[in-house]
Each structure stands twice: as C-alpha cells, then as structure tokens.
Amino acid sequence: MKQPFLLFAIAIVFLSSCKSRKYHRNNAQIEKAANKANPNFTDYNTLSYIEAFKGVAIEEMNTYGIPASITLAQGIIESGSGNSSLAKYANNHFGVKCTAEWRGKAYYKDDDQRNDCFRVYKDARESYKDHSEFLKRKRYAPLFELDKNDYKNWAKGLKQAGYATNPKYPDMLINTIEKYNLHQYDQSESEPDKIKREDRVFTEINANIPKETKKFAPVEIPVSKQVINTTDPNYTVQKGDTLYNISKRYNMTVDELKSLNGLSDEGVKIGQKLVVVK
C-alpha cells in the first residue's frame, strides 16, 4: 500500500515543480518586456505616486463616483506605492486576478493560493480603469449611491461588501487618506449630476449582473493561454483577440492560422470568422 501512495506523492511533486517552472518562465518574459519598455524605472515614494496617479483617480471618480481618495489609498496600500513586483512588471496596482473573461497576459504570484494568476496591463492607467470596472458589481452597488466625496463610508462599505478580509481595512484606508490629505482630490456634485451619474452606473451594473459569475470567477490560466481541442472548424473573433493568442488556444502557429484563412497581415476584426481546425 505504501509504494503506490509514494509514487502518487512523487508524481504530484513533479507536476507541481513543472507548473512552477512554467510560471517562472512566463514571469521572466513579462519582466523582460517590462524592463525593455521602461529601462529607467525609478521607485516611487508615496508622494510621487500620488502625483503620478491622482489625475486618473479623479477621472474615474468623475465617471463613476468612486472617491479619488479611496482609489489612491487602495493603490498605495495594495501596490506598495507602485513598487511591488505586480505593479512594476504587470502594471497591476490593485491585485486584480485573471478571470474567465480575461484575454490578456498573466503574471503568477503566491497569494490566496500558490501561483495565483494576476492580470497584466499595458500601463498603470489601464489598471486604474479596470479597478473601476471591477467595482461595478451587485455586491458594491450600494456604494455608488454615496456622495463621491464620502470617503469614510466608502471605506467602511468596501469592507462590508467583502472587498478585503482584514478587519482593519477601513481604518487603513481612512488613515492613509488623512495622512496624505488625499480627500483634497474628492469633489462634491450637484443633486442633478448625482442622479445622472447614478442612472448611468446602475444601468451598467444591472447589465453586468447576469454575467457576473463568469466575469469575475478567478481562473488558473487566462483564456489567451488556454489550449482548446475542438471539432468546431470555426471561431468568431472576440474583443481583445489577436492572431497570436487565437493560434495558441488552438495549438497552432500564427502562420498556420493565416494560411488556413488566407490572411496576409496580422490584423483581425471583432466578429470575423476564422477556420481553426487543420
């Protein structure tokens, strides 16, 4: 009885080791690309981080009603003021993980589980914008009824809605906001403007509700890297698709995909049907 169990345990360790090496190679590629894109990266301090990202935080506040102070405080806490490996290499300032609908690149890092899959963004602004999209969910909907300068109730509401497990998370946010005077970037809004903003945001939240389970379910491997075996000869191009990530999903080269479809360039259009079975 002991020998089969031992062989099984060895197999599990071997497979885990193979996975870890694969994730390490993936991260090395992401880090190499990030260093090439920004060879003169300089660590932020908290004040320089605020200066760099207050503009996009204010933009998102004016669009959705999330206080700029809350967004900045979350970025400071969750990214180490922009200096965490996830922020530096993946431009991910809020720890947003890969989900079933994510079609971009991935960066792997131990979190809730070993080698959790995190989203890679082309720049930090994209991370800030995706953070707003992440909050447009049924569980956070009551927060959007608050005034967009009500940072204290936003901080408490995020915890109550399950954004963080740390019982001191609201205090962490409020203390960060008040220490760095982040509430100076929050703005009041007139009642008519608030009503218009709420109508727009709640329309988007309600449209999201039927898709929330799939849209926000964490996955180990993003769609862009999943290999799909299928007898369906056609694939319809979705938003975010490229010939490269489609070819990887169907276990073929870009040249093979182009040849099958008579394509002469790298571009594809949303809704375009491609032959994906050789």
Image (tube, rainbow, N blue to C red):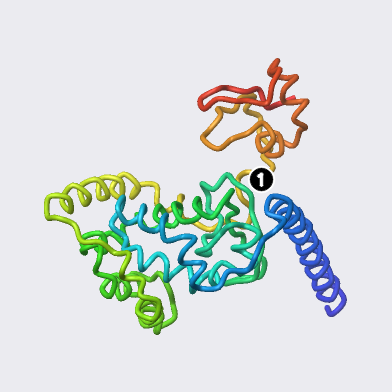
Number of other residues with Cα within 10 Å of mark 1, as a class: few under 14, some 14 to 19, many 20 or more? some
Image position, residue 158 (x, y; %) = 34, 70
Query: Which image quadrant for residue 258?
Result: top right
In the image, is 15 to the left or to the right of 55?
Answer: right
The C terminus, quarter of image: top right
Tally of marks? 1
Q: Residue 193, percent across and down?
A: 17, 50
Task: Residue lying at the far top in this picture: please name it.
Answer: 262
Looking at the picture, which amino acid does disc 1 mark?
Gln
The structure residue drawn at horizontal position 56% and vertical position 55%, both measured from the top left corner, is 98
Q: Which residue is mark 1?
A: 226
Kindly identify the residue that appears in the image at 51 percent across and 25 percent down. Answer: 271
Residue at 27%, 59% in the rendered image: 141
201 vs 36, nearest the viewer? 36
Q: Nearer the viewer, residue 260 or 126?
A: 126
> Which of 147/95 is in front?
147
Q: Secondary structure at mark 1?
A: loop
Q: Establish if 214 lies above or below 259.
A: below
Q: Nearer the viewer, residue 134 or 192?
A: 192
Q: Give x and y (percent) for residue 120.
A: 60, 53
Where is residue 140? Give x, y as percent: 31, 62
Using the rendered view, name the quadrant where residue 257 is placed: top right
Please give the name of the residue rendered at 40% of the width and 69% of the height, measured from the top-left corner: 163
The quarter holding residue 68 reads bottom left
- Report the side of 135 relative to 226 (left or right): left
